[in-house]
Image (cartoon, rainbow, N blue to C red):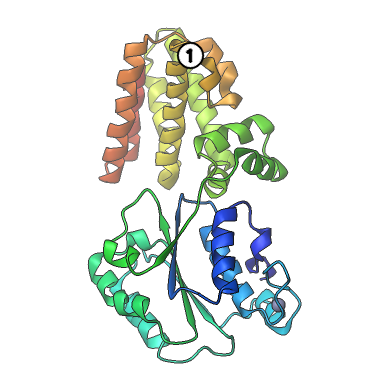
Amino acid sequence: MASDYFTIDSILGQEKAKKMLRRAVANNRLGHAYLFRGPVGVGKKTLARAFGNYLNCQNPTDSQDACTICQSCRKLKSGNQPDLLVIEPEGVSIKIKQIRELKHALTFPPYEAKYRIVLIADIHTMRREAANSLLKILEEPPPGNQLVLTGDEASEILPTITSRCQIIPFTGLPHELVEEKLIAGGLAPAAAASLTAITYGSLGQARMMADRELLETRRAILETLSELKQANSTSVEAVFQLAEQAAALNDRLPELLDLIKLWFRDLIIIASNQPEGIVNQDLLDITGKTAKSWPINALLARLELFDLAKKQLARNCNKTLVCEDLFFGLL
Ligand SMILES: [Zn+2]
């Protein structure tokens, strides 16, 4: 369980967030509740845990971090973390039942640590009823509890929540750092560069998309689409096969569609003679062959087909049928 233990300095980037938290501790002005707000996958939850480790460390370093060797740090490293409460969405949202359970847990003092760390993740998924139930705790948590909420910057968070938290802003990570990590994780440099650009420097998202199956399906589908387009063929058989291949990704299908859409965006960039803006560096072989197969107006119209397909998927339409429609439309 040692992988669950983090120090603040071990976390990539987010210097501003780290500085704000450290300054609050140094000035003895810890907020009741922090809201870590920023893009998905840039280290919000990890920093929340690292911050907790630091708060509970018995002998913090001069650079304001957990020492990793005191009794508290050793316990946390061994995975023994009775004073860490993590609340995450059940299904699509955080439920009022979870907040009631949390309130009950907070009627007891922390088990052994100086601070019980209460991490409420993805607060943007919380609906009004559950949020109302949380407000009192946010305003005045029982002593010995440090609340940290995380939320997506792109989604709305109820103002009743944000107004009761100190907001710590997180940003997309520097691209070279993300690329380095992805390459260290075994990804080819060109693919690492593409994914980093696609996800605007979100290591978490890039890692998710680095899934080999997804990338291979993307390449296979784009190769076939490009061949069909050049042969000026709308082989029904071939399109059916493509649709089945795509639909087999199930929950990851929307991600695949995002990736394919980004490739069409590259075609638009080429058609408008701005090749320096190309994102998919690992698909240049296919892009080169296909460039200018579609007139620019046709490309722009095709981008809308992706939005339509994603809406249909969100409504639980049959995945294979949605993909068939999309691929016929793209050709
Ligand atoms: Zn320590």
Q: Identify the residue shown where x is 55% and y is 12%.
A: 288
Tell me which residue sits at (63%, 73%) in the image: 54
Question: What residue sits 60% from the left and 54% below the top?
Answer: 15
Disc 1, ligand 1: is the CB inside 8 Å? no
Classify residue 167 as left or right of residue 276: left
190 shown above or below 251: above
Q: Can you tell me which quadrant of the image ligand 1 is in?
A: bottom right
Where does the image place residue 203, in percent across and percent down from the top left?
A: 57, 47
Relative to 98, residue 188 above or below: above
Quadrant location, the N terminus: bottom right
- Please say if 130 is above or below 14: below
Position in image of residue 163 (x %, y %) = 32, 65
Relative depth, front residue between 311 and 37: 37
Residue 167, image x, y percentages: 42, 61
Q: Is residue 205 left or right of residue 257?
A: right
Count of numbered marks: 1
Most extreme residue toward the right is 69
Which residue is pictured at 25% across the width and 73% down the height?
132
Choose between 168 and 195: the one closer to the eye: 168
Task: Inspect the image, locate mark 1, and give the three-letter code of the amino acid beneath it.
Answer: Ile
Q: Residue furthest left?
A: 129
What residue does disc 1 label? 270
Identify the image quadrant of residue 23: bottom right
State the image coordinates of residue 79 (x, y, percent, origin top left): 64, 76
The reply to whether residue 321 is in sight is no
